Image: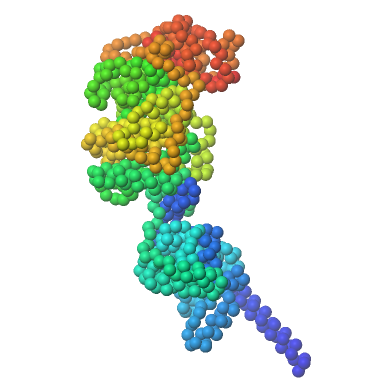
Amino acid sequence: MMRVLPLLLVVALFAVALARDAVDGWVARTELPLLAVETSVEVVDRDGRLLRAYTVADGRWRLGARADQVDPLYLAMLLAYEDKRFYRHGGVDARAMIRAAGQALANGRIVSGASTLSMQVARLLERGSTGRWAGKLRQIRVALALERQLDKDAILGLYLTLAPFGGNIEGVRAATLAWFGKEPARLSPAQAALLVALPQSPEARRPDLNPEAARAARDRVLARMVQAGVLSVEARAVATRAPVPTVRRPFPALAPHMADRARADDPVALRHELTLDAPLQRRLERLTHQTVEGRARRLSIAIMVADHRSGAILAAVGSGGYRAGARAGFVDMTRALRSPGSTLKPLVYALAFDQGMAHPETLIDDTPVDFDGYAPQNFDGRFRGRVRAAEALRLSLNIPVVRLTRAVGPARLMAALRRAGVRPELPGGRAGLAVALGGVGVRLEGLVRLYAGLANGGHAVPLHWRRGTAGDRARQGTPEQIVGPVAAWQVGRVLSRLAPPDGAPALPLAYKTGTSYGHRDAWALGFDGAHVVGVWIGRPDGTPVPGAFGGDLAAPVLFSAFERLGAASTPLPPPPAGALLVGNADLPAPLRVFGGGGDANGGRASAPLLAFPPEGVRLIPGEAGLVAKVRAGVPPFSWLANGRPVLSGARRREVTLPDPGRGFLTLTVIDAEGRADRTRLRID
């Protein structure tokens, strides 16, 4: 007998080994379901807050989730209730199975389950059933195979992503957004318990359809948590008194046009990180809705806000409501091609100031004029005679700005728009004087870029709406110079002295309004020391809006948008070096009265042309100073270095100017008729 026992032991061990090898082979041959679970595409703001999510292909809300995104209390409850030995078993909890089998035999019915979280993940991956033995065996097999392929945190992440919570809601993040209106990082005991209870019977316990069933299931979880030591008796008592949500909340849908744009720009990305600020976006969307509510049924609106210091777009509202209907809310009007009205006038003045043709105190004629058959009129049909350039800009007079445009040249105006990133489109292909009055197609986004450049000392600002590499690429390299810093500051100073709209607060803003021909577009654009805001109001189909003016319709919205930035307005910057802060009488003689606009039939000599130094050159001045030469033009000439007069009354066409010092230099020459030319160079 003693000899037989060792033999039986050997046979038993051999049988166990064979069985183990058979099970190992059975598990190893398991064909696992696809582990790359489709999740909702998410668009998030600069701080990672959800702006918008999209359903997956079958119409379900399924947001990816990891354990570190979820409140630890919920995880503790989940493991205590569903699988307390989750981190210790290999996919199947033998002790739980033996206990469940014993209870079933003793009671003649199933009293408790034995499914581990790994087994539940196996079922969720394959959309399998829970009750049949074949299904249960398959779950065991897949769970064992999953444990060999993935670590515990990955398996838990699959559960947190796939667990059903009623209707088309899957995953704990979708559940907390739908039932509580927030992410799962912070949950109350009552909320955590409800989330533990729902996946066991998601349809029967849906809070919006069966609140009493949801409450009862939640309270059972809370009672079990006291037994498991996860909650105190006092915490349970408080949690059971908390109401159960009875309404399913809508998923975030902020910045829908920008979200669609991001998705179209990168269709394969699951997460789009934007520069937008969700709270600001929400406030401005409410503002746009309030603005168009109760107005003409086809009226729409668009607003864009950017930080002109960094180029980050902080908010973009493409319409008064992202819906079908007369307002065509699905059309993103921040990108629609429209006539800019008078909003390009500040650039014309900046170019004239920069080229030494005019100064804010320069007198300019607002009198009838005819340029080869083109006879512009002021909006009100009146003529004011001779006015200061600053006043002409603030009053948005048409005739003075056309005179300046003729002197600057429409081609130079178009080039400056392109340097600013506006991307103008001409209906006829060739720029004429009417460009200054809105005879060109632009977009709100382009105008915001232009005003950002004026606010940024005349340097173009490449706006960007993606965080990370996209924004970094946009900011690489030296930005193009639209105009010099003195000219940009002078225009900002003129516009900052415009009175605010009736009822609006006195904010430190430089702003300009515009109304396109036929009252089709009402504009307002403005900036302070940090932000630039653009507002457009009109009809997406381009039909007129009777009585619409930028000053009456869009300007109040502009000031309301600045109020909603959430912080005190940043003051405009002080004057840069070289700014000429004098009255008209103290200006150099050629700058006192503008004479470069022409008249009905008058001809004149060619404008001055800087022959030396050439554009973009690097020079070392001689001992006597910087040599400069001018061709054409009518003497005497005035010379300016970075906007500051350095030589006046010069009749010779070759002069030696004082050494301007090292650095970048804008050299301007003005002839006796107020015409000018300039060049940019670097002094070493």
Residue 102, how many percent across, how many down?
Answer: 55, 85
* Residue 508 in view (yes/no): yes
Residue 357, how many percent across, how many down?
Answer: 40, 16
Q: Seen from this angle, which residue lies furthest front?
A: 234
* Residue 331 in view (yes/no): no
Question: In the displayed structure, would residue 571 be above or below residue 642?
Answer: below
Q: Give me the residue at 60% from left, 69% from top.
A: 87
On the rendered image, what quadrant is the C terminus found in?
top right
On the rendered image, what quadrant is the N terminus found in?
bottom right
Q: Give me the residue at 52% from left, 58% from top.
A: 69
**The one of 578 and 541 positioned closer to us in this rendering:** 578
**The one of 516 and 124 positioned closer to us in this rendering:** 516
Q: Give me the residue at 53% from left, 70% from top.
A: 232
Instruction: From the viewer's perspective, tell me whether residue 577 is left or right of residue 19.
Output: left
Q: Seen from this angle, which residue lies furthest top?
A: 651
Instruction: From the viewer's perspective, tell me whether residue 426 is left or right of residue 383.
Output: right
Question: In the displayed structure, would residue 49 be above or below residue 210?
Answer: above
Residue 524, how many percent across, how many down?
Answer: 34, 34
**The one of 119 and 186 positioned closer to us in this rendering:** 186
**Numbered circles on residues, count:** 0
Q: Toward which corner of the image does residue 205 lie, by quadrant?
A: bottom left
